[in-house]
Image (spheres, rainbow, N blue to C red):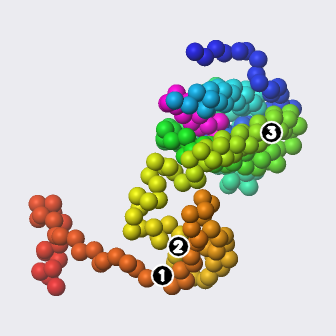
Amino acid sequence: MFRHQKELQFEVKVDKPDPMLARQIQEVLGGQFGEMTVMMQYLFQGFNCRGNEKYKDMLMDIGTEEIGHVEMLCSLISQLLDGASPDDQAEAAKDPTIAAIMGGVNPQHLLVSGLGGLPTNSNGVPWNGSYIVASGNLLADMRSNLHAESQGRLQVARLYHMTKDEGVRATFRKMLARDRYHQYQWLAAIEELEAKNGVVVPASFPPEMEMESQPEAYEFWNLSEGTESSDGLWATGSAQDGSGDFVYVKEPVAKGQVPKNKVPAESLHHDLNTIDALK
């Protein structure tokens, strides 16, 4: 059961309207790494979590918090659009640099939402359910969550420096602090899960089941020009689970065969036989 509370998690107040900034903020609302994505990702992971009550409860706590963050951003966008008119939007887009970068402000804020937030990114592309990861494997999901929070916080940090509006910045500072905590949280969950099952997903397919492929788990193949990659721990260190040492393969050699696919039936109209006849 969900219940809406009228008060926002944190205060949202802007110094003055700014339709261009409203468009930019759409990215951290409905973009690939926006609040809608983490909201849906954590909730679906929580809905589908089986047999791990503390993880399920944690996912539902954070997923529900993210619903509140979506509402905060919608409130922020609405305030930035307050009093905006078609004339205001046209004026904001007159600067040639802004027009070139942004293509003007978002007309859908006027035409579609009536000066409100939209479930889209900053270019008006609708939010997509394929953005979320909910695999049913806790460690895999927690790592995806860390990635999502890292990208989301990065984008909010960039937005922070794109405005001088102290009211907007105050809201962003709260979001940045929460996104920082969420990274701590996922790192703690990852550490706990790795201590239980190891660092490789899925733990239910152990290295021994790879049989003759064991050496392939430790080799770094140099497949681009230069050898600078040989300096990294991925090439000179040991596997994080202590199962073996990495090997740098400076001049790797292909170990497979040349594929020779059969010519398909002529009813598929590939014209391959015709081409051969013309040679």
- Label count reads 3
**Where the N terminus falls, by quadrant?**
top right
The residue under label 1 is: 252
Q: Give the crowd class for mark 3: few <14, some 14-19, many >=20 residues within 10 Å.
A: few
Residue 208's mark?
A: none
Mark 2 or mark 3: name the one nearer the start of the chain: 3
Q: Quadrant of residue 110?
A: top right
The residue under label 3 is: 177
Q: Position of residue 158 (x, y in %)?
A: 76, 49
Is residue 209 placed above or below 30 in the rendered structure? Answer: below
Q: In the depicted view, which residue is nearer to us: 169 or 85?
A: 169
Q: In the depicted view, which residue is nearer to us: 243 or 236?
A: 243
Decide: marks 2, 3 in contact (CB < 8 A)?
no
Q: Which residues are magenta?
A: 33-50
Q: Secondary structure at mark 2?
A: strand
Q: Is residue 241 magenta?
A: no
Quote the CA–CA distance across marks 3 and 1: 46 Å
The residue under label 2 is: 219
Q: Is residue 277 left or right of residue 235?
A: left
Report the amino acid beneath label 2.
Answer: Glu
